[in-house]
Amino acid sequence: MEDQQNLLALQMLVHEVGDMHCPSHVHFTDARDRNDLKFDVIYRGKSVRFHSIWDTDILVDRYPGGMTDMAIYADPMLNGSLSRRDAGKYMKGIQAGSVEDWARDVARRCNVTFAVQPGDKLTTEQIDEFSALGRDMVLFAGYRLASLL
């Protein structure tokens, strides 16, 4: 029974840290972003729920090799865009602070998504910006989860 409880606790930790890095999952307290992005937009010519593109679409479209390719593009430890020393400093900077600090960071970074309104057609520029944001949020979630584990 203890093993099952430990597994559940680990699963919840992984889920919660990952989820807090998704746009619309962390909010400002002044209610400027309370729509949760649960409305339809035009994304690549189709009407889709804006919230749902953050689960896979925005990343899969950009990184057709899936999460493995995205990890290589995103992580300076893997892609060589920084020296190992500088990549380590970058990772430590992302991991710094408390969970509350991370939530504020995510809310600030993801605030740009709340400019999109129901029925908007996402532009190529927005898709590029949101793809980079999604990539960064997955990277940040991974680094921060690693620091907790």
Image (spheres, helix red, strand yellow):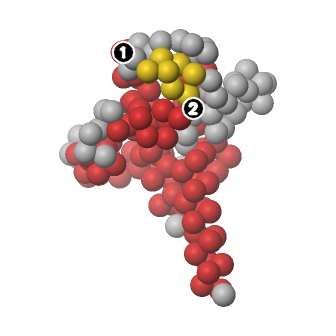
Position of the N terminus, as image quadrant, is bottom right
**Image-based side of 136 in relation to 70, left or right:** right
Which residue occupies the foreground of this view, 99 or 24? 24
Residue 31 position in % (x across, y down): 77, 24
For residue 147, above or below residue 49: below
Residue 24 position in % (x across, y down): 62, 33
Q: Which amino acid, mark 2?
A: His
Q: Residues within 10 Å of mark 1 (few under 14, many from 20)?
A: few
Identify the image quadrant of residue 131: top left
Q: Which mark is residue 124?
A: 1
Q: Residue furthest left?
A: 80
Question: Which residue is label 2 attached to?
Answer: 51
Which residue occupies the foreground of this view, 59 or 28? 59
Q: Residue at x 57, y 22 (%)?
A: 40
**Image-based side of 66 in relation to 80, left or right:** right
Q: Residue at x 49, y 21 (%)?
A: 47
Q: Which amino acid, mark 1?
A: Thr
Would you say the residues marked 2 and 1 are in contact, meaning their CB atoms lie under 8 Å apart?
no
Q: Residues within 10 Å of mark 2 (few under 14, many from 20)?
A: some
Q: Residue at x 51, y 53 (%)?
A: 144
For residue 132, above or below residue 40: below
Cα–Cα span, label 2 and label 1: 18 Å
Dot 2: what SS? helix
Residue 58 position in % (x across, y down): 41, 32
Residue 77 position in % (x across, y down): 28, 51
